[in-house]
Image (cartoon, rainbow, N blue to C red):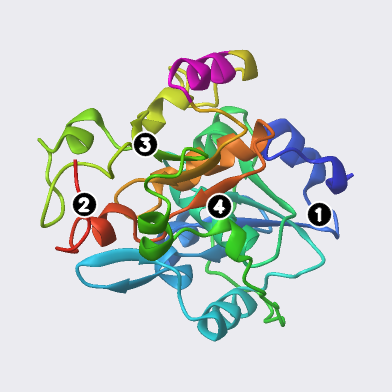
Amino acid sequence: MSETLPFFVEARQLHELLGAPDVQVVAVESEADFAQAHIPGALQLAKPDFTASDPPVEGLMPDTKQLAAALSDAGLRNDAHIVAYDRIGDAAAARLLYTLDVMGHGAISLLDGGLRAWHAAGYPLESGAPSASPTTFDVEPQPQGIADRDWIQAHLDDNDTCFLDVRSAPEYSGIDVRSARGGHIPGAVNLDWQQFKDANGRLRPRAELQELLVRHGIDADHDITAYCQSHTRSSYAWLVLKALGYTRVRGYPGSWSDWGNNPDTPVE
């Protein structure tokens, strides 16, 4: 049954699969929050477990050995379909799913609306500390899903490449400065990631999403790189594009915290 799971799953779908041997649920949150309340049987990972930092740059990809160790310690399995959720916004869970995908594990889904959606549907929660049995989770980097600073600089004038900035309009314009410099990657299109959601914080219908992307000139035929401040919000955008069938989609780990803090990169 898990083989047919879409990238975004409803609470009802996940509830029906609880306990299935080929499905693992992962809460992306702190151990303290997890201990307070989580979906029954869930595993736990915090964002620092699967990202790295080199201040002032945040949201980098960690060393592959360290990442494999963290995913193994959390109990993740390569033979499982992994469904991630978080407590608010879905972006942290999406960043885990992006990391899994570009490390060779493409059997992934996001619980649309996260823990709030699960609770609102009336499904049970449990408390207690994480108690996973360690596994051996293998990772194999997939470079086609990753854009770094050098790759972006080499493709700035490429008409086949689109840079999707999913930060807020003030961040994009340089009014809200969160790095040494404000602004955006030259030629980038701005589409605030929150526009992918409805008033309840859930994914908007497919037709609305497609119309939104067309209106912003996001062409599925292009090689699209999504970025934000540290590639958390843009991981959600990346997953939306994947769900819509876009095949040439990259993420930029480090994102504006990398680009905007480097004095040698061009900025608009």
Q: Are marks 4 and 1 in contact (CB under 8 Å)?
A: no
Q: Which residues are magenta?
A: 208-217
| Whole-percent x, y for residue 80 in the image | 79, 61
Q: What crowding class fits label 1: few (fewer than 14 Cα within 10 Å), some (14-19), or many (20 or more)?
A: some
Q: Which residue is mark 4?
A: 38
The image quadrant that residue 226 belongs to is top left
In this picture, is 113 found above or below 51? above
Q: Main secondary structure of the magenta part?
A: helix
Q: Can residue 68 be seen from the camera position used here? A: yes
Q: Earlier in the sequence, mark 4 or mark 1?
A: 1
| Residue type for callout 2 | Pro
Circle 3 SS class: loop
| Residue type for callout 4 | His
| Whole-percent x, y for residue 145 in the image | 58, 56
| Residue type for callout 1 | Gly
Q: Can residue 43 be seen from the camera position used here? A: no
State the mark number for residue 19.
Answer: 1
In the rendered view, does 254 fall on the left or right side of 86? left
| Whole-percent x, y for residue 110 in the image | 61, 43
Q: Residue at x 21, y 52 (%)?
A: 266
Q: Which residue is mark 2?
A: 266
Circle 1 SS class: loop
